[in-house]
Image (cartoon, rainbow, N blue to C red):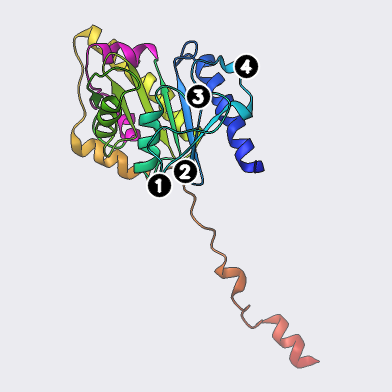
C-alpha cells in the first residue's frame, strides 16, 4: 500500500472519531469516504470508530458500480451515494454523512434550509435542499441525494440526516459542522416565528466574496529586479573629483 493511501486511510478514521467528538454524529451511524486515485476509500459498516485500523477501510473502484470492494470488512451500507458523488462530482474529494440533531430535525420535517444566514453561500447557492425519502442504502436514495446536491456541496436527507462534500476531508468536515450550525440557527429562528431570508442577490454577492476569501495578493517583486538609478549629487561630484 502506498504511503499516501495509508495516510488517507488514517485521516478517514480520525475524521470519523471527530464526528462524534464534535457532536455531529452518534455511534457508528455516520460514514466518511475519500477519493484516492481511481478508487474510493470508505469507512466500513457497523464498526466502532475506535476499533478501526487503516487496513479495515474498504476500497472500491470508482468505475465499477457493482458494489465490489477490497478489504476485510464490507463498506458502509451508504456506499452508493458516496460512490456516485465521488464518481460524478470532480469537485468532490471527500464525502461526510452523519445524523446531527438539528439537520436531522429539519430533515424529519422534510424542510430545506433557506438563505437565513449569509453562510448558506458556503454550500453553493441560496438554499440547502432536502432530498426525498428512501430506505437507507438503496439506489433510489443515492439518486435523490445526487439530485439534491446538484450545484450544491451539502444536502439534507428526508427523515435521515445530511451529506457534505469537500475538496479535501478537512473541507468536507468543515462543511458538515457548518451545516449543523446553520441548521440550529434556522431551527431557533423558527421558534421566534420571525426570520428574514436573504435575497438571491445578497447570496450571490457573498458567493463572489468567498472566492477571494483568504487569498493574499502576490508580493510585488519587480522593484527588486529593477536596475538602480544612477547616483547623483554628492556621490557624482566625488566621482568627478577622483
Residues under labels 3 and 2: Cα distance?
A: 40 Å
Q: Where is residue 34 in the image (x, y as percent from the top left)?
A: 49, 35
Disc 3 is placed on an element classified as loop
Q: In which quarter of the image is residue 65?
A: top left
Tell which of 95 and 167 is nearer to you.
Answer: 95
- Would you say residue 128 is visible in this rendering? no
Disc 1 + disc 4, Cβ < 8 Å? no
Residues under labels 1 and 4: Cα distance?
A: 41 Å
Residues under labels 3 and 1: Cα distance?
A: 41 Å
The reply to whether the magenta stretch includes residue 108 is yes
Labels 3 and 1: the sequence-earlier one: 3
User: Farthest residue toward the right?
Assistant: 242
Q: Where is residue 196 in the image (x, y as percent from the top left)?
A: 20, 21
Give residue 51's mark.
4
Q: Quadrant of residue 124?
A: top left
Q: In which quarter of the image is residue 50?
A: top right
Disc 1 is placed on an element classified as loop
Rendered position, 93 above or below 172: below
Q: What stretch is highlighted in magenta?
A: 100-123
Residues under labels 2 and 4: Cα distance?
A: 37 Å
Please give left or right for residue 136 compared with residue 242 in the image.
left
Q: How many numbered marks, from 0 up?
A: 4
Give residue 49's mark.
none
Residue neighbourhood size for the residue with mark 3, other residues' Cα within 10 Å, grouped as few (<14), some (14–19), many (≥20) = many
Tell which of 24 and 39 is nearer to you.
Answer: 39
- Would you say residue 72 is visible in this rendering? yes
**What is the quadrant of the C terminus in the image?**
bottom right
Please give left or right for residue 96 compared with residue 182 in the image.
right
**Which callout, 1 or 4, points to the residue nearer the camera?**
4
> Would you name the residue on which mark 1 appears?
212
Amino acid at each position: 500500500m502506498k504511503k499516501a493511501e495509508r495516510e488517507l486511510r488514517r485521516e478517514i478514521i480520525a475524521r470519523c472519531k471527530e464526528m462524534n467528538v464534535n457532536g455531529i454524529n452518534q455511534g457508528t451511524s455516520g460514514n466518511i469516504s475519500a477519493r484516492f486515485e481511481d478508487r474510493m476509500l470508505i469507512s466500513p459498516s457497523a464498526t466502532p470508530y475506535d476499533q478501526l485500523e487503516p487496513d479495515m477501510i474498504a476500497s472500491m473502484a470508482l468505475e465499477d458500480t457493482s458494489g465490489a470492494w477490497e478489504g476485510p470488512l464490507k463498506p458502509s451500507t451508504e456506499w452508493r451515494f458516496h460512490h456516485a458523488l465521488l464518481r460524478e462530482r470532480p469537485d468532490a474529494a471527500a464525502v461526510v454523512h452523519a445524523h446531527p440533531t438539528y439537520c436531522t430535525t429539519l430533515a424529519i420535517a422534510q424542510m430545506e434550509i433557506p438563505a437565513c444566514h449569509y453562510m448558506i453561500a458556503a454550500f453553493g447557492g441560496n438554499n440547502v435542499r432536502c432530498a426525498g425519502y428512501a430506505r437507507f442504502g438503496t439506489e433510489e436514495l443515492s439518486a435523490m441525494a445526487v439530485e439534491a446536491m446538484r450545484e450544491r456541496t451539502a444536502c439534507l436527507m428526508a427523515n435521515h440526516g445530511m451529506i457534505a462534500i469537500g475538496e479535501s476531508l478537512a473541507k468536507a468536515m468543515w462543511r458538515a459542522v457548518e451545516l449543523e450550525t446553520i441548521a440550529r440557527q434556522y431551527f431557533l429562528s423558527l421558534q421566534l416565528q420571525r426570520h428574514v431570508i436573504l435575497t438571491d442577490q445578497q447570496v450571490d454577492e457573498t458567493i463572489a466574496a468567498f472566492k477571494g476569501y483568504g487569498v493574499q495578493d502576490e508580493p510585488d517583486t519587480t522593484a527588486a529586479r529593477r536596475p538602480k538609478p544612477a547616483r547623483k549629487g554628492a556621490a557624482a561630484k566625488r566621482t568627478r573629483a577622483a
